[in-house]
Image (cartoon, helix red, strand yellow):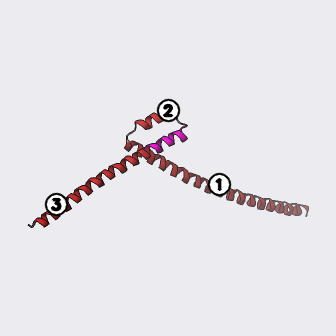
Amino acid sequence: MKNSTKALLIGVGTVVAVGAIIVSSSNMAMEKIESKINRKRARYFVKEKLKGNEKAMTVVDDLSDMEVANLLSVVDKVSDLRGSVSSYGDHFKDTTSDFRDAFMEKKQDWKHELKHHKKDLKHKLKK
């Protein structure tokens, strides 16, 4: 093998090794940043929703990064569920209102029919 080919292979190998180290360290850096952001979100959740409860804040501080991520996924799912429930609640209110309106119309119709039948009955009794 020629010296230039060996040098080229060594150069390419070095570049690949350095690139792998950079990618690996950037992945670790991204994971660290993500875990810090998740922990801040969890602390914010405790501060806002649990009124800054010190015991809950201590628990969040003691959780592992994976546990914090799991906690936040549960919080996100509950928030999504709450949004769904409120939309169902609005739909339920609309349906209830429509039913009430339909019932009131039917009630008026029944009153009108009853009044009409009373008049007919009185008229027949007079004869």
Task: Identify which residue is drawn at 45% across, 46% down.
Answer: 72
In the depicted structure, whether residue 109 falls above or below residue 71: below
Point out the frontmost of discs 1 and 3: 3
Q: Which residue is mark 1?
A: 93
Q: Quadrant of the N terminus?
A: bottom left
Q: Verify CB contact (< 8 Å) between mark 1 and mark 2.
A: no
Q: CA distance from mark 2 to mark 3?
A: 57 Å
Q: Is residue 114 left or right of residue 98?
A: right
Relative depth, front residue between 103 and 18 = 18
**Residue 50 percent coordinates (x, y):** 53, 38
Mark linked to residue 54: 2
**Residue 75 percent coordinates (x, y):** 48, 46
Relative depth, front residue between 56 and 94 = 56
Give the amino acid at mark 3. Answer: Ile
Quadrant of the image occupied by residue 20: bottom left
In the depicted structure, whether residue 2 falls above or below residue 101: below
Q: Which residue is mark 3?
A: 10
- Label 1 or label 3, whichever comes before in sequence order: 3
Task: Identify which residue is drawn at 82% across, 62% down.
Answer: 117
Give the amino acid at mark 1. Answer: Lys
Helix, strand or loop under label 3: helix
Task: Identify which residue is drawn at 78% across, 59% down.
Answer: 108
